[in-house]
Amino acid sequence: MRRGTSRDEQGSALVEFVWLGMLLLVPLVYVLIAVFDVQRGAFGVAAASRAAGRAYALADTDAEGARQARAAALIALADQGLDGHPFDLAITCQPGPPPCHARGKTIVVQIGSRVTLPLSPPALGGDAPTFAVSAEHRVPIGRYRDLSP
């Protein structure tokens, strides 16, 4: 047995703690950033569907309503930092076919988009992974303006 050759390990626990912390903290931060991005997208499409429904209901005609609904959706998405993201906007009315600006009708606005996960390099297999987010909002005609004769 050799007595004088013991290693001094003073301070190595701190180094191990820092490395273990980094190994666990980096993936956790990435997951949180990804979740917050998807949540931001969900909030954005929900706000856009409400704004588009309100704009459509306040318009005088269906054609003008579709134009105003698209503009309102773009503004609402930009408020959540989603400007430039492609989105699908579908406006229907129930019951029955258009015109939607008639007594007893309900405007149904559906918006769908995709949120790209952050920090995903193309070297991992082509396009960055995305999550689909969508929202639907219903507006009865007469909710935002009076249609009485």
Image (cartoon, grey):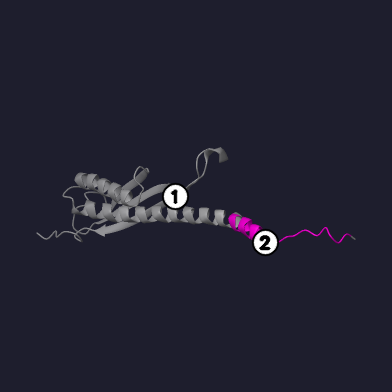
Q: Can you give x and y, in whole percent of width and height, for residue 17 in the image?
A: 63, 60
- Which amino acid type is shown beneath numbered disc 2? Ala
Q: Nearer the viewer, residue 101 or 1?
A: 1
- Viewer-nearest of discs 2 and 1: 2
Residue 102's mark? none
Say what secondary structure mark 2 lies in. Answer: helix
Residue denoted by label 1: 132
* Left or right placement of residue 67 versus residue 41 in this view: left
Question: Where does the magenta region start and end?
Answer: 2-22
Q: Are marks 2 and 1 in contact (CB under 8 Å)?
A: no
* Residue occupying image coordinates x 42% and y 56%: 39
Please indicate, yes or no, whether residue 111 appears anywhere in the rendered image.
yes
Q: Earlier in the sequence, mark 2 or mark 1?
A: 2
Mark 1: few/some/many CA within 10 Å (<14, 14-19, 20+): few
- Which amino acid type is shown beneath numbered disc 1? Ala
* Residue occupying image coordinates x 60% and y 58%: 21
* Left or right placement of residue 117 versus residue 9 in this view: left
* Residue occupying image coordinates x 43% and y 52%: 37
Residue denoted by label 2: 13
